Structure formats: C-alpha cells, structure tokens
Amino acid sequence: MRTVSAALALIGGVMCAFLLDVEEDVPAARQSVAAFPPAPTGGVPPPAGDGAQGAVARAATPTSHTRWPHGTGSFPVALSARGERYRALVEQAAREYTLDSALLHAVIATESAYDPRAVSPKGAVGLMQLMPETARRYGVSDAFDPGENVRAGARYLRDLLARFDNDVALSLAAYNAGERAVIDRGYRIPPYKETLRYVPAVLARYREIKGLPDS
C-alpha cells in the first residue's frame, strides 16, 4: 500500500505530463452526487494505465485502493495566518462529518486561499468554492458565510468520499471537475489540465499542513 507521502513523492517526476494528453478545461458546472450511481461494488478501478494522464493519475493517487480513514482525529499543525482564523470552524466541521481537518484546510487553501468572498469565473463561491447547485443541495442560504460554506463543503466532500469508496484522489477530482467527469471516465481522474494540477496541489498542501516530510 502506498501512503500519502509516498504517492506525493512521485508527483515531481511526472509534472511534464501535464502538457500532454490532456483536455483544456473542466466542465462549467459540478454535478450533484444525487444524479449518479455509486462506485462499482468492490471499489473503484485503478487510475488509467498508459500515457501522460495515467502517469499523473498514479502519482496523484495517495492510496491506490488504500482508502481514506473515517475521522483520523488528527489536527493541522501548520496553518497560515488566514488559516488560523478559521481553525475552530474547520475542526468543528471535520468532527461533524468525520473528516481529517487537515484535508479540509488543504481544500480551502487550494480553492480560495481562505478568502470567504472569493468568486471564480465559473460562479463558485466562498471558502470552499461552492457551485450554486451544490449550495442549494446542502441548504446553504448564504454561500459567502464561512460557517455555512465550510459545513456544506465538508458534507459534500464526505459524500464524495462515500461515493468513491474513500478514494481521496478521485473524490478531490470530483470536487474539482464534478462526479460525472470521474464516472464517465471509468472512475478515473479526468484529463483536464486544471484537475490534473488540482489533485496533487491539494495533497501537497495537506502534507505541508500535517508537517509530513517531502518523501
């Protein structure tokens, strides 16, 4: 089994693959988890085999069939000043949805750099960059409110982990590109430039927050 750290150590060797065999952009909207079937019984398939996309997917995957634990009980040890401002909020959401708070921090740092007023060109809003349909699904009345945004984002991430058999790389890919993009590609990381950068970026930030070594 590969650990998070071991998988992250492979990323540097395949960064050039981002320039090959990839599609230009992610879909304009992220799809609701309610719209698609669950992952196949027995877990998701391994990342794509040959070519640049397969290499990046393998490097980005922290656990090739090693699943993300439910509620590790560990907490971030290295946060930016902005991150510290939201530490209590993130840890509360992590406990509520049995997530590692460091993973939530890594997603927030990558998505919005802890800017609660952030709005993407595609309409994603707030700390965890919720798309409007995701905000509606999770009952968010004000996506700019840090508490509502983080709780909904944490719940969405937990739902993705459940759908993708606790495969954190696929769940992060779905958070970025939408579930349909992952499912339509045989439960593999979709070959979008943004997504192929996003998954390793979140995992690298996770390692940094946890204070894990580079290799």
Image (cartoon, rainbow, N blue to C red):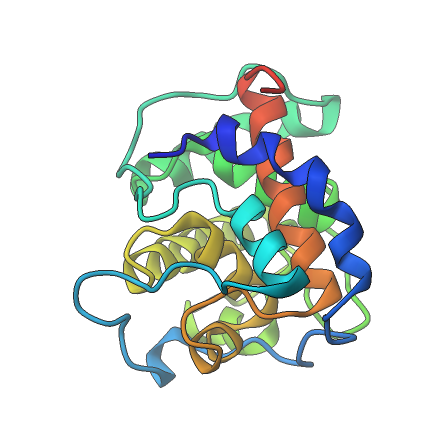
Where is residue 82 shown, x and y percent of the image? 72, 29
Where is residue 191 shown, x and y percent of the image? 64, 70
Q: Please tell me whether residue 5 is drawn above or below residue 25 in the rendered image.
A: above
Figure disc tally: 0
The outermost residue toward the front is 50
Where is residue 171 shown, x and y percent of the image? 45, 57
Quarter holding the C terminus is: top right
Quarter holding the N terminus is: top left
The outermost residue toward the left is 41
**Is residue 70 or residue 116 the one in the foreground?**
70
Q: Residue at x 58, y 34 (%)?
A: 8
Q: Please tell me whether residue 17 is drawn above or below residue 188 in the rendered image.
A: above
77 to the left or right of 168:
right
Q: Residue at x 24, y 72 (%)?
A: 40
**Is residue 15 or residue 198 the one in the foreground?**
15
| Residue 90 visible in the picture | yes
Q: Hey, which quadrant is residue 37 in on the image?
A: bottom left
Where is residue 166 shown, x and y percent of the image? 31, 51
Q: Residue at x 27, y 74 (%)?
A: 38
Q: Please tell me whether residue 46 is drawn above or below residue 200 in the rendered image.
A: below
Q: Residue at x 63, y 19 (%)?
A: 214
| Residue 126 visible in the picture | no
